[in-house]
Amino acid sequence: MLGSVAGGLGLFLLGMWLMTDGLKLAAGNSLRRLLARWTGRPLRGLAAGALITSLVQSSSAVTVATIGIVNAGLMGLTEAVAVIYGSNIGTTMTGWLVALVGFKIHIKMLALPLVGAGMALRLLAPQRRAGALGAALAGFGVFFLGVDVLRSAFAGAALPLQALSAGGPGAVALSLGAGVLVTVLMQSSSAAMALIITAAAAGVIPLASALAMVIGTNIGTTSTALLTTLGATSNARRAAAAHLLFNLLSALVALLLLPLFLLLIGNLEEAGSLDLGTPVLLALFHTLFNVLGVAIMWPLTGRLVGELARRFRSAEEDEARPRYLDRNVVATPVLAMQALSMELTRIGGISLRMAKAAMSAEGSEGPRLGRDAQVLDRLVDAVGDFSAQMQRLHLPPELDDQLPNALRVSRYYTELAELTGEIVEAQRELPSIEAVELAADISHFKGSVVDLLDGADAGAAGYDPQVSAAQLASLKDEYQRLKSHLLRAGTAGELPVRRVVEHLDLFSHMRRLAEQAEKGARYLAALGATGVPAPGEQRAPGEAEAAG
């Protein structure tokens, strides 16, 4: 019997694999595209999750695909949570297939023709979509053959399962754990459901224990999604956490519903008005508690997404959160301006870090710079919103004059970040110059830009706007000399004219980068004229006048 059970499970898992992979191959990238396209609204996401899962017969495949789409930034967390709800409803279709088809018809009359037709398609069009559909069709046949083998294996079996038959909380807990374990080991809640239904239908497992095991399958199926999130983005981890929380809540609902469900069944059987059979009862219970779980969680989804958004934060997301812009300080103008100055100092530090990485790494820091740019954009937006709140108040004249300077600082640093991106792209495309003297001049010029960036940090203790202004003036002279050297190289034929123009554009971007850094630091230091200097700022006498 054990060999037949193992063989039946093997056939069932093989059929599930053929079905899922065949349908995914037939769809190509359509599964991801359909999920991304059909989930513009939460209700559509719920319907799409249920429909697609019922078609591919794998909630794990849909959940993993959803997490992948979230990982790529193509789907929002709210829509992803709705898809996960739907996939849990869609996966109950497996129980209905086993209960209604596996136990109501002569399986071999259906399964063997499906296998034959599917493999014929596979052989005739192995590289086409029809071949993948043939594999899926054969998978359906093998799926039902596995159900038939399991049903035959359990028929008339008598296993020593007194612990499950004893009833009470201990038996329920043991059955629940068995359902979780079987699902984790087989990595398929559908296979676990088929095993439970066939065993319960043969009387090997009591109905109450089978119902508890069905609850366990809902918990065990979360293991696939959790494994998928290793190394994934924060949003992907949030989606997996939503999957886990929903399944745990559904399991809790099912455990509370279990005594009522058993009582209702007992009363109906005594009255002689219930003749559904064990397989249908198990499929019905599985669907019922998943639908109830969705009904309970649906109005709480917004709160769940908000709570998850505050957790599983990446370093970039933490950096993108304003540290000083507290709405509670807006009512106190002096404190609000100080908070604004401190947040702008953070923005300046990120911008300078981006600029120095681009100058020093010859464009190899592209991915990191992209993440920094997103952080900077969010912080600049927060500064704009905070400044708008301040403008609604009656600010003292000295602060009212300083607020436009704060916005000017954020604009300078935004432009600096944009120039950084342009420099990275240009350096990635341009070949290096082999002329020794010209290469030396270029290297010296870039070193001068980095030196200026080091000195143009208004948050540093040693920042001096006069020194930074002198560095910028010297840099502009060096730029003019480098420009002349490049033009002479082009005239002498040492460089193609097109390369000369491209390098001139690159070095012009670098000069402008230095200018934006110097202006941003100077105006940021000028905010100290309000009497609340930024962190690390040491104002020299007359500095405010010079900065203006």
Image (tube, rainbow, N blue to C red):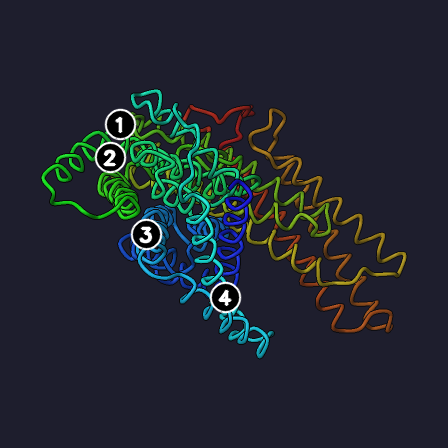
Residue 79 visible to the viewer? no
The nearer-to-camera label among 2 and 3 is 3
Question: How much space separates mark 4 and mark 3, taking CA atoms?
Answer: 20 Å
Which of the two marks, 3 or 1, is nearer to us in this view? 3
Query: Does the residue at mark 2 contact the one at mark 1 (Cβ under 8 Å)?
Result: yes
Q: Nearer the viewer, mark 2 or mark 1?
A: 1
Mark closest to the chain's N terminus, 4 or 2? 4
Q: Which residue is label 2 attached to?
A: 393
Compare marks 2 and 1 and give the one earlier in the sequence.
1
Report the Cα–Cα distance between label 2 and label 1.
8 Å
Q: Position of residue 185 (x, y in %)?
A: 53, 38
Tag 4 residue? 138
Q: What percent of the width, then of the height, locates residue 167?
A: 30, 23
User: Nearest the camera: 527 or 89?
Assistant: 89
At label 2, counting other C-alpha atoms closer than 10 Å, the crowd grade (few under 14, some 14-19, many 20 or more) is few
Element class at badge 3: helix
Q: Which residue is mark 1?
A: 331
Which amino acid does the dot numbered 1 rest on? Ala
Determine whether the residue tagged by mark 2 lies in a helix, strand or loop: loop
Q: Earlier in the sequence, mark 3 or mark 1?
A: 3
Discs 3, 1 touching: Cβ within 8 Å: no
